[in-house]
Image (cartoon, rainbow, N blue to C red):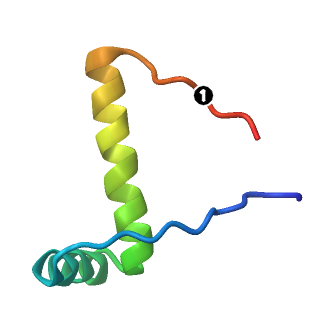
Amino acid sequence: MAGNYYAPFSVRIPEELLHKIKALAEQNKRSANKQVEYILERYIAEYEAENGPLPSWEP
């Protein structure tokens, strides 16, 4: 498969948290999905800055 493939991943979160994510997404002109992706990418970058790189994944 060419290009980026985004694997589906379901997650259950409290409604209040989802509401807040959607509010942030709207402020940032993103979908809620892209907002969650952005939050996770920032968290991992911060983690790796403090603890070293995590292993890479090769399909």
Task: Quadrant for residue 39, please give it.
Answer: bottom left
Residue 33 position in % (x across, y down): 43, 74
Q: The residue under label 1 is which amino acid type?
A: Ser
- Residue sitting at 22 percent across and 79 percent down? 18
Q: Is residue 31 left or right of residue 25?
A: right
Question: Toward the viewer: 18 or 31?
Answer: 18
Residue 29 position in % (x across, y down): 36, 80
Q: Residue furthest right?
A: 1
Task: Quadrant for residue 32, please give it.
Answer: bottom left
- Residue sitting at 41 percent across and 80 percent down? 31
For disc 1, the marked residue is: 56
**On screen, residue 43 above or below 47:** below
**On screen, residue 12 above or below 47:** below
- The secondary structure type at the circle numbered 1 is loop
Q: Residue furthest left?
A: 16
Task: Quadrant for residue 20, please give it.
Answer: bottom left
Quadrant occupied by the N terminus? bottom right
- Residue sitting at 23 percent across and 75 percent down? 21
Quadrant occupied by the C terminus? top right
Residue 15 position in % (x across, y down): 16, 84
- Residue sitting at 29 percent across and 42 percent down? 43
Q: How many marks?
A: 1
Residue 8 position in % (x across, y down): 58, 69
Binning the other alpha carbons within 10 Å of mark 1 as few (below 14), some (14 to 19) or many (20 upward) gives few
